[in-house]
Every structure is written in C-alpha cells, then in structure tokens.
Image (tube, rainbow, N blue to C red):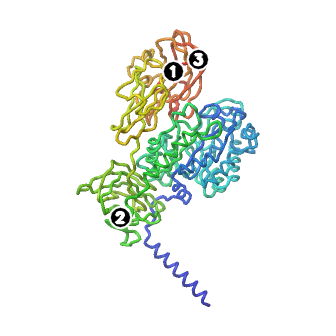
Amino acid sequence: MNYKNIFSAVLLFATVHFYAVGQSNTPAPFGPLPTANQLAWQQMEYYAFVHFSVNTYTDMAWGNGDEDPKTFNPVSLDCRQWARIAKEAGMKGIIITAKHHSGFCLWPSKYTEYSVKNCPWKNGKGDIVREMSEACKEYGLKLGIYLSPWDRNRADYGKPEYITYFRNQLRELLTNYGDIFEVWFDGANGGNGYYGGANETRKIDRTTYYDWENTYKLVRELQPKIVIWNDGGKRADLRWVGTEAGYVGETNWSLLDSTGDVPEDMLRHGVENGNKWVPGEVNTSIRPEWFYHKKEDGKVKTLPQLMEIYYNSIGRNATLLLNFPIMPNGLIHPKDEKVVTAFAQAVKKAFAVNLLTGCKTAASNFRGKDEKFAGDKAIDQSNKTYWATDGDVKTGSLTMQFTKPVTFNRFLVQEYIPLGQRVKSFTVEGFVNGAWKELAKQTTIGYKRILRFPTVTATKLRFAVTDAKSSPLISSMGIYNAPQILAPPVVVRERSGDITIKPADAESQIYYTTNGSNPTPATAAKYTGPVKTGDGKVMIKAIAWDAKTGKSSSVTEESFEIARKNWKIIGINDTTVNNILDGNPGTQWYQNNSMQLPVDLVIDLGKMENVSGFKYLPDQNWWASGIISKYAFFISQDGVEWTKVNEGEFANIKNNPLLQSKSFAPQKARFIKLQALQNTQGDNRVGYAEFEVITE
Ligand code: FUL
C-alpha cells in the first residue's frame, strides 16, 4: 500500500464514521414524507399562472371549442414581458395554459389543426409555449404546463382514441420544451361542447377515463423532476385546496388518503393521519376571472387583498399560484403589473428584518443534549438544521431573550419537513410589562406558518409546541414588524339607490367621487353617511385616507346599474326574497325547495326600461348550493307575452362563484324572467345572492 492508498483508506474510514455517528442521533422519519420533487416545489413558494386561449377573444371564461382560430391574433405578444413581471414579482416559475378547455393549442401540435398553426399571428409559424420556455430560461424561471384533459373541440372526446391524442400532446409538451416543473390536469368537465361539430353533452368518469396511472407513468418517464397536479383523478403529487378564492385552511396537513374521493373540507385542511404526502397549492387569479375581460379592469385585486392571500396561502403551509389573464394583444395589463410589483415590495418590506436573529435561545429540552439539535438551530438562518425535542417528547418550548424591548406583529415558523409534518398545536407568547401574554395559539405548521397579531412590544418571546405526532423538529423561526397597509373601502348600493361606503379599519376617513375623477382629500367629497344618487346608473370611486400619516389606500371603483327601489318580485310571498336586491353579497334567497327545474325568477321593474343584459351573483358562502349553471333569459312588456333574448352557461361558476354578467341587444321591457335550467349540483335547488339588470 503506498501513501496515497493509505490516505484514501483513512479518509474513507473517517467519512463513514462521521456519517454513521452523525446519522445515529438523527430523529427517525415520521409518517408519509415528501419526495425530493415535492420538496423542491414547496421551496418555490410563489409562481405564476397565465391564461390565454381563443376565448380571450370572445370574452368567455371557457371556450366552447368552435371558436375560429383566425380570431387568435396577439399582435404584441411578448412572453418576455410575462417573465419579466413574474421575476420582478418574486415568483419562481410560470405555468402556461398550453391547452385550455377550448382545445386550442398554443403550440403547433402535430396532432391537431386547432392551434396557433392556423391563426394569423406570425402567419401560423409561431409557438407560444416555445417563446414562454425561452423567456423563462432568460429570466431564471421554471416552466409549468396546463394541459386540459377536457377538450371541447375534439370529435373523439369521450372515446378511447382521445386518450391517445391527449398522451401524444403530453409527449410533445414534456419532450420539446426543456425541464417542466409542474403539470396541471384540471378536473373541470362541463359536459357540453362543440366536439367536432356534434354540439352535444358528453359525460366521462374523470377518475377512470384518462387512465391516470399510465398517464402519470408517461409524465414521470419524460420529466423525472416534475410534480403532478390533478383535482379530477387519481391522487397526484399536489392537491387543489377546494376553492379558487385564494386561501387554504388554517389547519393544513400536507397529507391525504391515497384512495377514495376527497370532500372539499379535506382539500382545505388535508388529513391529519393521511397515508400520502399531497401538499396544497392555492390557485387564484389576480382578477375575478382566469381569462382577460376588459370589464374587469377595475377589479384587479388590491395590495391588501393580495397580502391577505399571501398570509392565507404561503403563510399556511401552501404555495401560491397567482394567475395573470393575458390581454387579446398578448400582454399582461399594466394594472396587474403594478399591483403585483407593489405586492412583492410589501412582502419584502414586511419580512426584511428578522428580529430574532442573534437572540439568546433556551430550549426546555433538546435531543440527547446534542448541540446539533439545540434551540438556537431554529434561528440560525439555515433550514438544514433544526431544534429537536428530546427522545419521544412531543412537547417543548423555546424562549428567546432580547437585549432590549422589541416591537413586532408577525411570527414565522417552519418545520423540518424532510422528516415529516409533526406539530399539531403551538402557542406564541410575549413577555410584556413583566408578564407572559399569549399572542397566538395555532394548530399545524408544516413547511411554513406565518401568524399576524396586533403590534406588541416585548422583552422575551416564548414558542411552545403543545402537541405533536412525534418529536417536533423546528428548522426556522422569526418575528417581524410589518408596516400597516391601508385597505380600500367597500362600496355598496342599497336597494333604495343610496350608496354606503365602509372603511376596512376604524381609523381612516373616506373620500369619494361620482364623476370618474380619482378622489383625493383635497378634491373629493368626504363621506359622512349614505350618498343619495337617485335611480339611474352610478359610477363611484372611493379611497380610505389616514390623517396621521397622510397616506391613502388604492381606489375602489364600482359601477352600479339602475336602482332596484321600485322592483317587485312576482309570485313570491317570502320577504327574504328582497335579499337578492339589497346590494349585500352576504345575504341570499333560495326558491322553494320542492320546485323542479326549470325554475323562474320573475321581476316587475316598475317601468319600461331599455334592457340589454343582467347580472347574477350566486350565494357566496363556502357551502353554497343552488348555483345556477345554465339559464335562459326572457323579457316582456306586459308580463304575459314573453320573448327569450338570451340563453347559455355560467362557465366555471362551480369553482369560482363570481358575479356573472350577460349582455344582449337592448330591448324595451318592464318585466324580466331569469330561468334556471340547471345547477352545479344536478339537483333542483336554485339560489341567488344578488340580481341586477343592465340597461342601455
Ligand atoms: C378551473 C378552470 O375551469 C378555469 O377555467 C381555470 O383554468 C382554473 C385554473 O381551473 O377549474
């Protein structure tokens, strides 16, 4: 043996020895664990969705599949703009709707003519998925693919042949565009569509039709580092959280059971004793709808709303997938860019300084008195190290001593999830004026948990795990003093026509205009009580203003249709029916339970109007039923002779129960009738939160 060999042998022994010793004291994993792909995905935390298809040009939430590809002409398309905005917003990737329910493909698929190949943009030579993947590379973002299993264009949809088509497309997308971090298989299946001219309703069993097992196999073979999202089939790697409103449950386990249907409540909270790691992804749009609709330019989520979403998603052990609807010209709207950039800055500012850094930390107990697992490992800025309680002990506390009083209003904590999610409950206390004060008491932690509470000044902080499935492992902790953000006011038009405006907090004052100009304290009227605006249409802009700081909120902008003061709902004795005309989205009315669909809502408008559409808001409660999905709309001058003026679907209303607005050529009418033809649950229930007519 020469020196070199001896040296290598010693080195090998030392390494193995060190490794073995290091390993021996490491806590054993507990319960289902994340895969390496799921771990890498969770650390991304925040990424973008972009929704773009032929229905962008028809102002619809879902394409029917018969939209002419010639309408698809994004003259200024610039995927680099999308990538730049996502990057500046602090996002780590972008998921593109390569094919939405319309079936139209944003890439020149070999297997269909219904794609960018046959549109005027770049004379049919363009490929948006390619441009997106190149832009992502340039900006250091990961690329994800949304491929809708439901295809309203294909003649063979519903037959076995379609599965071959679907897999061929998957193969194209997962082979030709580099690494794909996530694939999105939406579960929507509204049934009806164009289907190559059949124009009919087709039903499939979404759990079996797509043969997910083999489809997943193909996905993993083509992209070994991918995670699969699927709300319509066999359990995938990630789960939907049961709502598109931008939040997950406060208690949020990253576990589910691997078989059986998952009710929405489980999607929101996960399953404490589930047998598979399936973490939640909160998907929501920066505007009410997923696709671009000009009428939503005034409805872009505000900074306070986005902050709320941040705390209710990333702050609750989920990731945030925030959608940008792409405009017909191929760009993200400047309003969306502005608010998402402000959002990034606000988050950065809120979490800029961790006030626990360098604190003296004492743990009530730690694993085997091994310094490697001591309390300071929770605040050492590394998420590879962690504080572990001793042996099987499931409870324990960490006390942080400050050198001077510290003011804060946020608490952040992370579990070391490579060894499982363990904590069931915990408390946070501050030592205030010589006594311990409870600041927060919560349940799960998982990858990351952030709590908000009123600003407090303390000299010590105590974090205690009060229950866990196994010895808790805490990898990271922080306290922060986040600046307060002024929320824009909420504007409501009462049935009388009066407008009421409410600030989000008690301290701010409100200023408003009705002439379209932007309100400022110097130029606008100060709100002192309900504003009388008569019976006509009104557009109002309002701000909240803080006299102490001179700061104002962003502008709330609302356009109201004619007042509903003199309306009469015909044939109903129940007085709660007026809930649907009171301007309050939180109150609702349901038609008599025993009625069979179709069910009519008939209203006398009190006088002849030039009716050109209507708005329907379904019950906004989480457990709402009676949500109309298909309707017909009639008008009449005398309440006897009726003319049908509109009929259709409220697309995606099940997942996203937004205000639905339908327009048609103006007609003179004093009576209107909304006929519910179908609801989202397939039963006979019909409910409404608000109803309005649109007039010329
Ligand atoms: C839903 C779809 O039906 C919407 O159009 C959108 O794509 C959203 C992300 O998922 O279920």
Nearer to us in this view, 493 or 391:
493
Q: CA distance from mark 2 to mark 1?
A: 61 Å
Disc 1 under 8 Å from ligand 1? The reply is: no
State whether residue 180 is above or below residue 612. below
Q: Hey, what amino acid is under mark 1?
A: Val
Disc 3 under 8 Å from ligand 1? The reply is: no
* Label 3 sits on residue: 666
N-terminal of the pair, mark 2 or mark 1, is 2
Front disc: 2 or 1: 2
Q: Secondary structure at mark 1?
A: strand
Q: Residues within 10 Å of mark 1 (few under 14, many from 20)?
A: many
Q: Are marks 2 and 3 in contact (CB under 8 Å)?
A: no
N-terminal of the pair, mark 1 or mark 3, is 3
Q: Residue at x 49, y 17 (%)?
A: 602
Q: Hey, what amino acid is under mark 3?
A: Pro
Count how many numbered circles sit on residues in the image. Answer: 3
Q: Residues within 10 Å of mark 3 (few under 14, many from 20)?
A: some
Nearer to us in this view, 83 or 373:
83
| Horizontal and vertical percent position of residue 330 | 65, 40
Q: Residue at x 57, y 48 (%)?
A: 86
Disc on res. 359: 2
- Quadrant of the rendering where the C terminus is positioned: top right
- Quadrant of the rendering where the N terminus is positioned: bottom right
In the visual, does 11 lie left or right of 412? right
State whether residue 261 is above or below residue 20. above
Asked whether residue 401 appears in the rendered view, the answer is: no
Nearer to us in this view, 169 or 355:
355
Q: Secondary structure at mark 3?
A: strand
